[in-house]
Image: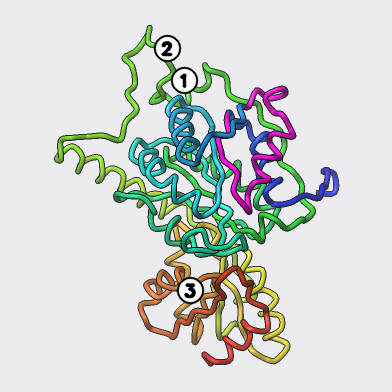
Amino acid sequence: MADQEVTLMKGNEAIAHAAIRCGCDGYFGYPITPQSEVLETLAEQKPWETTGMVVLQAESEVSSINMVYGGAGCGKKVMTSSSSPGVSLMQEGISYLAGAELPCLVVNVSRGGPGLGTIQPSQADYFQSCKGGGHGDYRLIVLAPSSVQEMADFVDLAFELAFKYRNPAMILTDGVIGQMMEKIVLPPFKPRRTEEEIIKQCPWAATGRLKTRKPNVITSLELDPSVMEEINIRLQNKYKVIEEKEVRYEEFMLEDAEYAIVAFGSAARIGKKAIEMARAEGIKVGLLRPITLWPFPTKEVAALGKRVKGILSLEINAGQMVEDIRLAVECKIPVEHYGRLGGIIPAPDEVVDALKRMM
């Protein structure tokens, strides 16, 4: 890292710069707090003059996700970003993308809700992102960064996984990570793929070149229920492969832990500070941070449940991930939730108090 250029920027800005550098073909989005800097930074950088990347502000979130659908159907590396209510408007299009098995990236810099809610940060979109959100039995690959560096790093990773499995991927973050500034190293530039490379890498894509093959039809529609069932079974088998191969997580001070905190994103940063404070008082506690919210590290949480006396699910919401933790440990140990609502961020001392209450 000493030989690389270190720069200071917001998480939202890091998303934009990383998109340009990883060879993204197109961004289609609509401004909404607290993620508007993604679109603003792209407009400021003018990548259409350097890499050829298309940047377009659509008239709505519905339009932007359908533009993503069109670009993804052509095998292009395309993305959008929004915040909670905006992602709600995109849910139908996201389901279409999943049903058509099209790779793309959706960034959700979440805020408090329900409804219009607040522009302050929240993690209350866990259900929306990790449980499908839209209609039908589909899954998104969901990455949860906890630093500005990971905001940049996960853009390329999300595209890599999306194309590997022909599945939409999401970076689920929040207003804390999106708005905070940290030192980061931006990824190196990757050239955008040529049309020939796209045709070779994405034989399923609708590229318009029909001289040597039959046209590819991009759709999520199938009127024959028996065929639709076969498609769904194939999708479910694909999801099982992703669950087996793509789980990512971080462990912190768990070697001798008697209690554990499970937290993702910005809550994990708070959890680490709370652990330092708790250990200063003699409480042996550690952290498991899911990096992939889906696939969720179920096996790792289950194994953790056999080593500790109790688990605290730390979330900036009313309790959503805690359900997956309880399913993983099968009610063999106490699993409690602690979180704040309305855009309020829990303080580390509050987390320590919550740990003491469950001891």
Spot occupied by residue 118 in the image (x, y as percentages of width and height): 58, 62
Q: CA distance from mark 2 to mark 1?
A: 9 Å
Residue range of the region highlighted in magenta in the rendering:
26-53
Q: CA distance from mark 1 to mark 3?
A: 46 Å
Residue at image coords 55%, 73%: 341
Depicted 100 relative to depicted 128: above or below:
above
Three-letter amino acid code at the position of disc 1: Ile
Three-letter amino acid code at the position of disc 3: Ala
Spot occupied by residue 280 in the image (x, y as percentages of width and height): 73, 88
What colour-coding does the image apply?
rainbow
Three-letter amino acid code at the position of disc 2: Arg
Residue at which label 1 appears: 199
Question: Of callouts 2 and 1, which one flags the residue occurring earlier in the amino acid sequence?
Answer: 1
Residue 50 belongs to the span the image colors magenta: yes
Depicted 20 relative to depicted 148: above or below:
above
Q: Nearer the viewer, residue 128 or 218?
A: 128
**As drawn, is 238 to the left or to the right of 230?**
right
Residue 52 belongs to the span the image colors magenta: yes
Q: CA distance from mark 3 to mark 2?
A: 51 Å
- Within-10-Å neighbours for mark 2: few <14, some 14–19, many 20+: few
Spot occupied by residue 252 in the image (x, y as percentages of width and height): 63, 71
Residue at which label 2 appears: 209
- Within-10-Å neighbours for mark 3: few <14, some 14–19, many 20+: some
- Disc assigned to residue 318: 3
Residue at image coords 35%, 52%: 240
